[in-house]
Amino acid sequence: MMLRLTGFIIVLVLLLGAVGWLGQHDKVNNGLYRTYYGENGVPNTHLAVYQDAAETYDVDWRLLAAVHRVETIFSHSSSMRSSVGAIGPFQFMPRTWLGWEYDTDDQKGDVPEDEVDLTDLALIEQYGGLGRDGNGDGKADPHSLVDSAHTAAYYLSEHGGKKTDSVTSVRNAIFEYNRSEQYVNDVMTYFENYESSVTFMPDERNTLSQRVAYYTIRYVEWFKTLG
């Protein structure tokens, strides 16, 4: 009996270790978060950020939530960076944030963050960048959820994404944000889902798969603190 119990504990430890190790890989993490949030889930801790940015620039907060969902599955990690160099929760290219008048050899829009201060409002104004200071701290930080949400709202508003604009205009604004028809369709799908029914997480976990994903995410996050 003791041998069987010891064997079970060893298997359990190995299994949990494997889950923790796998959870450090982006694809696994993304899969967990997609399952957890499902088609209608929005982080309740982000709601005030979306609503404030949306009200400031007259866009629908659910549109902002949909963009954030598609871009980074609601991440607010300061280390978020895509394979092409887009940074932050709402995935702006550094040169778009700072301004395309900034002189650099990289034509895709990357700017090394040790080369220039992307948060400097004076530089952003000088180079015609998009970056906005959403929380009034005197900086426009692309890694800040608040600043990047305000910047996304500003950009959508400027390109026809206001609450009073037509669906066609909103779709065009999303396309300007990311020039992909698939991207537009993905954002509009979540936007429409949130319009019809939205579940604020983590207060509600309605399905078994959501509950499993939620506790796995919590375990993976705890596991990372050990390393």
Image: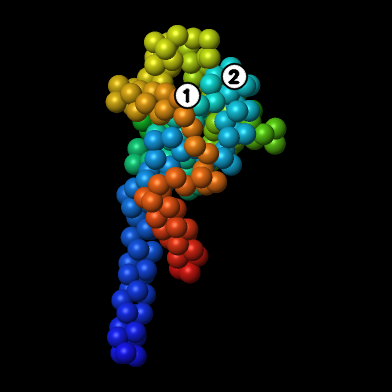
**Position of residue 169 in the picture relative to residue 116 (left or right):** left
Give the CA distance from mark 2 to mark 1: 19 Å
| Residue pointed to by mark 2 | 57
Q: In the rendered image, which quarter is residue 220 located in?
A: bottom left
Q: Residue 51: give x, y in percent of width and height.
A: 60, 28
- What residue type is disc 2 on? Tyr
Q: Is residue 39 above or below residue 203?
A: above
First in sequence, mark 2 or 1: give its number.
2
Question: Which quarter shows the N terminus?
Answer: bottom left
Question: Which quarter shows the C terminus?
Answer: bottom left
Q: In the rendered image, which quarter is residue 49 located in?
A: top right
Q: Which residue in the rendered view is the most extreme toward the bottom?
A: 2
| Residue pointed to by mark 1 | 195
Q: Is residue 180 above or below residue 168?
A: below
- What residue type is disc 1 on? Glu
**Position of residue 180 in the picture relative to residue 152 (left or right):** left
